[in-house]
Amino acid sequence: MSAPLLEVRGLARRFGGVAALDDCSLTVRRSTVTGLIGPNGSGKTTLFNVVTGYLRADAGQILLEGRRVARPDPARLYRRGLCRTFQQPRVFADLSVLENLLIASGRRRAALAGPRVRADDRDRAEALLAEFSLAGLADDPAEELSYGQRKLLEFAALLMSSPSLVLLDEPTAGVNPTMVRTMERHIRARHAAGTAFLVVEHDMNLVMRLCDPVVVMAGGRVIAQGPPGDVQADPLVLDAYLGG
């Protein structure tokens, strides 16, 4: 069996006297949409931040495609095919919708205008905007987008790098049911095209129909993982959520 896309071994991270991650281990394999669930404060976003280099681990190892990542750095991981979204979508509000995608392709701000933009970058950006139903807003400032549209723009921008693994941090939080279905459709389409996902999500209906396997965290560590139906019935998971 080939090496997992992502393997986390024994990660630990403390904030003062609080263990946000405590001997946390999990794997994400190719061709999967892996769900990551758990009660608030269970360590899910901290795990994302440590894996992607926004926080330093106190202990443990991170491996990407079987190779240890000694010092995770967001830019280097992006170039290696691992990228992530945030709970609050991060876009360049002062740039146009199209320019947000061109920046994601590696263009500098000074090179966004005129002939210095490569035709293939522009073509790819325009194709993604069409795919995400944002083509009609290409020249609008990103700050004028709705919250849900910003989430779509952030997602589309990540795809400019043709990632192998995308970490989605609550992709449907704060959006209406129509946008939830839209986001699910895009995840499924990209998964069918070969992209793997690790998805933090609180909408259990979405998790159960979209994700397999599902990983459950509580107290900074993984307490269960497996097919969604098995995880849903696991006594440890029920106890973590219901506080029994």
Image: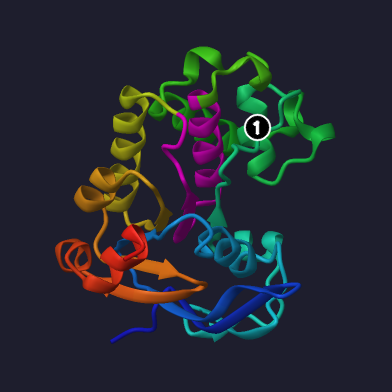
Above or below, 128 relative to 85: above
Region in magenta: 148-174
> Picture quarter containing residue 145?
top right
- Residue nearer the viewer, 10 or 81: 10
Q: Where is residue 11 in the image (x, y as percent from the top left)?
A: 57, 81
- In the image, is residue 153 part of the stretch drawn in magenta? yes
Mark yes or no: residue 118 visible: no
Left or right, residue 228 beside residue 2: left
Q: Is residue 15 visible?
A: yes
Residue at 63% from the left image edge and 68% from the top image edge? 50
Report the residue at 54% width, 65% height from top: 43
Which quadrant: the N terminus?
bottom left
Q: Nearer the viewer, residue 27 or 119?
A: 27
Q: In this view, does 86 lie to the left or right of 36?
A: right
Q: In which quarter of the image is the C terminus?
A: bottom left
State the image quarter where residue 79 is shown: bottom right
Does the magenta segment cover residue 186?
A: no
Q: Residue furthest right?
A: 110
The answer to whether residue 81 is above or below residue 179 is below
- Residue 217 vertical placement versus 23 (above, below): above
Where is residue 80 drawn, in percent x and y?
Answer: 58, 66
Residue 222 figure quarter: bottom left
Q: According to the image, label 1 marks what residue?
A: 100
* Camera-nearest residue between 35 and 71: 35
Q: Position of residue 134 (x, y in %)?
A: 48, 21
Secondary structure type for disc 1: helix
